[in-house]
Amino acid sequence: MSARDLRSPSATTPLLQAAEPHPSAPHPTLSPVDARDSSRQGQAHIAVHGGRGPVHGHEQEGGDGEGEARVCDGHWGDAQVHHHDGDGDGRAGVQGHGEVAHVGSARRALGNVVISIVGAGVLGLPFTFRQAGWLVGSCAIAGSASLSYYCMMLLVRCRRLVAERGHGSINTYGDLGYHACGQVGQRAVDVLVLVSQGGCCVAYLIFVGENLASILAGWPSLPGTSVRTTVILLLSPLQVLLAWVRSLTGLAPFSIFADVANLLAMAVVIRDDVSSFTRPTAVHAWTGLASVPFALGVACYCYEGFAMTLPLEASMKDRRKFPLVLGAGMFCITLLYIAFGVVGYVAFQDGTQEIITLNLPRDLSTDIVKLGLCVGLFFTFPVMMHPVHEIFERRIMLTLAFQRHVQPYPRLRRFLLRAVRALIVLAAAMVAVQVPGFATFIAFVGSSVCALLAFVLPATFHLQILGTEASWGTILSNSALIAFGLAFAAYGTYSTVWRG
């Protein structure tokens, strides 16, 4: 989650500011018809690239006041967007591929790295260590951190290569895909980010349902359903109403609140873990080869923040320090993950549940933390769903039937687009109800989508951009990374589904 997760998308401080578009940046998705209608009707098509951090745009001017948030890539998170008449693909603003202002210090960039990656997915790590063993879980975390750092730096090197050749400005992961492989590369990034984003939203619902069900244990549920299912179904209509909110500004504080609640939850868990320590009679370092893909899938999910890499690097005053800053952030996160996973596993051993907060004793402080997490993630859900809504809406709005029979009628257009958003939210709720468990689901997302985003695409883009300049060592290392990513995505997905 990262607050990516529950890969929660985490909110950051507003370090990234809006800037003017770069004239050479590709504009791959908005058609002339879409742009013309946007200008005439005042429908803002705001593309937000990147990860979970807040994005700041401008106020909408004129038109019917109906804004659309559009994603071209990025792990969407706590975006803070005001509608603006126009279209564009800006990472930190609107009207084109905006470049991030170079205003961030190394300290701020380090904080952004940590906040952009760490999310509520960390609360599933103790269960992962129980399933795979503390040694296997620790190695999976460390290995995923190392590979993620290497591949994030591949993205930075690719941008620098493109800039050195004078081929345009690279502001986002999707831009890089376009420069490396054309429309195919950009669409691959868009689709994978969309799927991972949808997966994060489903994980939110699972998390909220599980934790509220633990608080409301013993309460009546809908006929033939569990309390968790009842909670998810009852919250769905409220999420539909939030999905109809076009401006994300009012929801941004709740995303920050979710991050604070997440940190408090970790503190309470560690406190109760230490007080619950018993003789570790059921603690295992290794539980078998079959558990390794599961551990790697969760680890990949917990480090998924690739769409934020390029915007974070661009936000620094001195970009030369970014490798050191990113490395320091990944090192701190890795220590936090391993310590939290081991402490939680040792405290509850074979009784460790999929979400560690479910192991905590029923008292006022625990219930407050759970409620805080649920409230924060409940209001972060519509922020994370914005790009999913927009992509579906954009596809519908570009059809000839929509342009002829719906676009001229504002009320009909508004009704149809709201219906689409409602159906998407209800579909996510239905998936969440069917998923057997939180840890299993994030392992599935990590093994399938995150592995491709983290390992396969960076190595592929690097080879494509280097072309004939690539050395044999680079070709072999990147090819090995691609092969590993594809094999892991295939086998990890199969293994996780089979385990589930």
Image (cartoon, grey):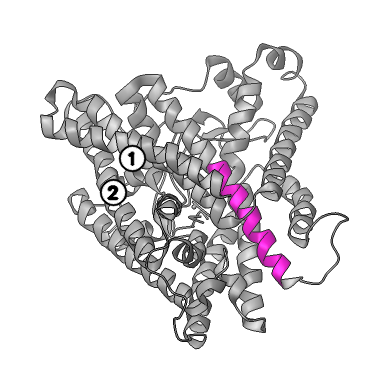
* Residue interval drawn in magenta: 197-214
Q: What residue do we see at 49% from left, 83% from top?
A: 271
Relative to 357, say whether 230 is above or below.
Answer: above
| Residue 135 painted magenta | no
Q: What residue do we see at 62% from left, 69% from top?
A: 372
Instruction: Identify the amino acid type marked 1.
Output: Phe
Find out whether the residues at labels 1 and 2 contact each other: C-beta distance under 8 Å: yes
Q: Is residue 498 visible?
A: yes
Give the number of callouts.
Answer: 2
Q: What residue do we see at 52% from left, 74% from top?
A: 264
**Quick one: SS at disc 2?**
helix
Q: Which residue is mark 1?
A: 455
Residue 147, disc: 2
Instruction: Identify the amino acid type marked 2.
Output: Leu
For residue 455, side relative to residue 154 (left or right): right
Where does the image place residue 341, in percent across and percent down from the top left?
A: 43, 69
Q: Nearer the viewer, residue 83 or 315?
A: 315
Relative to 448, say whether 228 is above or below.
Answer: below
Where does the image place residue 399, in percent across and percent down from the top left?
A: 65, 15
Q: CA distance from mark 1 to mark 2?
A: 8 Å
Q: Main secondary structure of the magenta part?
A: helix
Res. 204 image quadrant: bottom right
Q: Nearer the viewer, residue 495 or 202?
A: 495
Res. 280 image quadrant: bottom left
Of pointers 1 and 2, the one earlier in the residue sequence:
2
Relative to 219, say whether 69 is above or below.
Answer: above
Where does the image place residue 222, in percent across and percent down from the top left?
A: 86, 57
Where does the image place residue 410, in percent across and percent down from the top left?
A: 76, 26
Relative to 316, say whether 463 is above or below.
Answer: above
**Quick one: SS at disc 1?**
helix
Q: What residue do we see at 59% from left, 24% from top?
A: 39
